[in-house]
Amino acid sequence: MRRILIALVLLTVIQIPALALRNLNENYELVLNVAAKKLVLYTNGEATKEYPVGVGASLTPTPLGVFKVVRRIYNPAWVNPYRQSKVIAPGEKNPIGQHWLGFAMNKKTQEYGFHATSDLSSIGRASTHGCIRLHPDDMKELFNLVMVGTTVHVIYNPIEVKEFQNKLFVRAYPDIYGYMTEEEYLKFAKNQLSGANLVKEENLYKAIASKDAKDYFIGWTGADVLNEQETGPTEKGKLQ
């Protein structure tokens, strides 16, 4: 059986302004929020499943942008390109598990993708070479749902606004890649709060100051639909 080698990657970054996420309309789409270390599966435009993930470290960040799943491999082989180690054959000793969904390739033909991990402590952390780590059970489920051609939105939004029973909450995550200023945190939050009644606006500033990934009550919805979440500074982490 032909071995396919999956390489992980180091990339450079550039900067241009953030854009907003719009119109998810395929049967399945994936939205990866790197700052939140969270992958969301959308089915016909509705969020149906959320997976905690591990993402790229600050020196080897996960690339941002809009991609497609380009490779879907069961039982991949693997080699660590940074250590020039030997090929690790498919099987229990393979650190990326039994499933691979490749979605981006740089100019060096090195590929980024979703894969499982035996190091469960790395899920929820920024410690990879740029690839996305999932719990093995989550990766198996995702692999069985997602096909080649599925769109993958990789965004960087370290501040999220959530609605629950007409109440609004804000959650701020650490800026793991140093892409954001405090002013941009505030701008991103307010861009998502169109028409809202902010009775606890001071909590918005507390959330941004703490960046502790906790929910802070900030007010009540004043509009039927909140604005779409921001993608963040996607071009700062553009694939090279």
Image: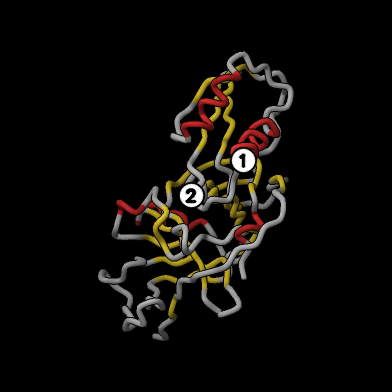
Q: Residue at x 67, y 58 (%)?
A: 15
Residue 84 image position (x, y, % from top left): 36, 82
> Can you say whether 44 is above or below 87 in the image?
above
Q: Nearer the viewer, residue 171 or 185?
A: 185
Residues under numbered marks 1 and 2 in contact, where contact means CB atoms less than 8 Å apart: no
Q: Is residue 52 visible?
A: yes
Q: What scheme was used to colour the molecule? A: secondary structure
- Residue 118: name its quadrant: bottom left
Q: Is residue 147 left or right of residue 53?
A: right
100 or 155, nearer to the observer: 155
Query: Which residue type carries mark 2?
Result: Ile
Q: Which residue in the protein does label 2 denote?
A: 176
Where does the N terminus fall, quadrant-wise? bottom left
Which residue matches tag 1? Answer: 46
Q: Is residue 177 left or right of residue 45?
A: left
Rendered location of residue 225, percent (x, y): 70, 28
Circle 1: residue type: Glu
178 relative to 218, above or below? below
Name the spot of residue 23 as percent of width and height, x first.
Answer: 72, 46
Which circle, 1 or 2, is nearer the viewer? 2
